[in-house]
Image (cartoon, coloured by chain):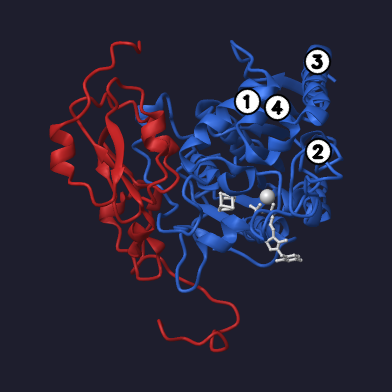
Chain colours: A blue, B red
Amino acid sequence: MSEMKKIKNLKEFSTSADRFEGANLLCPGCAHSIIVREVLNATNDDLVLSASTGCLEVCTAVYPYTSWDASWIHIGFENGSTAVAGAEAMYKALKTKGRLKQPDRNPKFVSFAGDGASYDIGFQWISGCMERGHNIMHVVLDNEVYANTGGQRSSSTPIGSSSTTAPAGRVSYGEKKNKKDMVAIMASHNIPYAAQVAPNKWKDMVKKIQHGFAVDGPVFINAVSPCTTEWKFDPKDTMHLTDLSTDSLVFPLYEIIDGHELNITYRPKDVVPVEEYLAAQGRFKHLFKDEYKYLIKEWQERVDAQWAHLNRREEARV
Amino acid sequence: MANTGWNEFEIGAMLRTFEGKIDDIAGTLQEDRAYTQNSSFSASVADWRIEKPVFNKDFCIDCQFCWIYCPDISIISRDKKMIGVDMDHCKGCGICVEVCPTNPKSLLMFSEQADEEAELAQWPAKDKEKK
Ligand SMILES: Cc1ncc(C[n+]2csc(CCOP(=O)(O)OP(=O)(O)O)c2C)c(N)n1
Ligand code: SF4
Ligand SMILES: [Mg+2]
């Protein structure tokens, strides 16, 4: 294994030479690129990357431009994970046969994909990669919606959110199904590492990414990615929204080692009411009408129950 | 390349972002890289901006919050010091101003047409209400 990059503090981290470039076409204030930067800058090793169709891919590979200073491939919506897994399998085979020109460079294999590409359309591909034990990391940029095609609901879209295919209006409060628990599903493949991260907690995130790079086997990372366009907030407030998401425990930060050892990695000093998180976003605006206020109460109860569940799992080590 | 019709593209494309060979990209800063025209680094999104950030180094404590949270790799930090904003790649989102912890802030948003020197000369004073 190559030496892990030393990142003691933010000043030290800021000496990194980014391998992701500006003048990409992501919206101003998009969190996708903040997440990508934190992942790529967590290592100095070579990178073999993919992106499944979605905002990140579409906005960083507009012919004749690319924003990636590393080997990067895009094929389709569903198969970014298997593209990287294929490269990793080839790498392993060449290494075994002694045919690598530079056998000690230790590249890292990372697949980036949206929630639509991960929770829905690439689901079986990712599950296959996890089950087959490829030495890859799959990172979900979780903005809880198909953002790139205009905001259709995905199985990551939470209850009460208004999307173009489950809009709030006279007869409906929007999304009626609860968000799929993807981290738990992926951890159930008994992979060495699964974690939820958020770009505001960069230290927690970098530590998890480095842990993921260090283990042998598949790694699953779910990163909350506030979307200024679909969540409907001002671009300058992306980090404020991320803070609300972690501090209201809507996006709790935790890791699951070997499918069972759950550790909560961030416990907010002052937990923010879920209502504040919802109120900061246009996609939940209608919940503040009198007839839907009960949904806000249910939201809080769901978040409390999820937090209690994580705490029980942490204690019981199951 | 600019005049390629929609039906004239090759199926599949491989783009190289650097001229020649680079052995250690992660150890090579942007100013030392031989970017090709295919890297989006060679392009600009400056015309997206309605407002622009202005940096006042007098108040900056080099915390690097703006560096880590900039989505557009537009905060230039070298040797652990914030030295300025890359105005070719900044889209004017304003995140850097929001996360700047100093009082007064070391980064503020102004209209794209504002005169930087003039704004620096009349920078707001410390806000006594805020801790
Ligand atoms: C097989 C297939 N179905 C549908 C599409 C159209 N499509 C392109 S991007 C996209 C949405 C991507 O959503 P997500 O994965 O959540 O990424 P985001 O844009 O939100 O980051 C869709 C539906 C496609 N390219 N391929
Ligand atoms: S629509 Fe959302 S996810 Fe897509 S580029 Fe814009 S802010 Fe980013
Ligand atoms: Mg999405």
Cα distance in 3D space between marks 1 and 2: 16 Å
Question: What SS does tag 3 mark?
Answer: helix
**Same-subunit check for callouts 4 and 3:** yes
Quarter of the image for the N terminus of chain A: give it: top right
Q: Which of pointers 4 and 3 indicates the residue nearer the eye?
A: 4
- Closest to the observer: A43 or B98? B98
Q: Is mark 2 in CB contact (under 8 Å) with mark 3? A: no
Residue A284 x/y as whole percent:
70, 36
> Can you tell which mark lies on residue A246?
1
Mark 4 residue CB less than 8 A from any atom of ligand 3: no
> Can you tell which mark lies on residue A179?
2
Q: Is mark 4 in CB contact (under 8 Å) with mark 2? A: no
**Same-subunit check for callouts 4 and 2:** yes
- Closest to the observer: B9 or A28? A28
Judging from the image, mark 4 belongs to the subunit labelled A
Closer to the N terminus: mark 1 or mark 3?
Answer: 1
Judging from the image, mark 2 belongs to the subunit labelled A
Closer to the N terminus: mark 4 or mark 3?
Answer: 4
**Same-subunit check for callouts 1 and 4:** yes
The residue tagged 4 is A250
Q: Amino acid at mark 2?
A: Lys
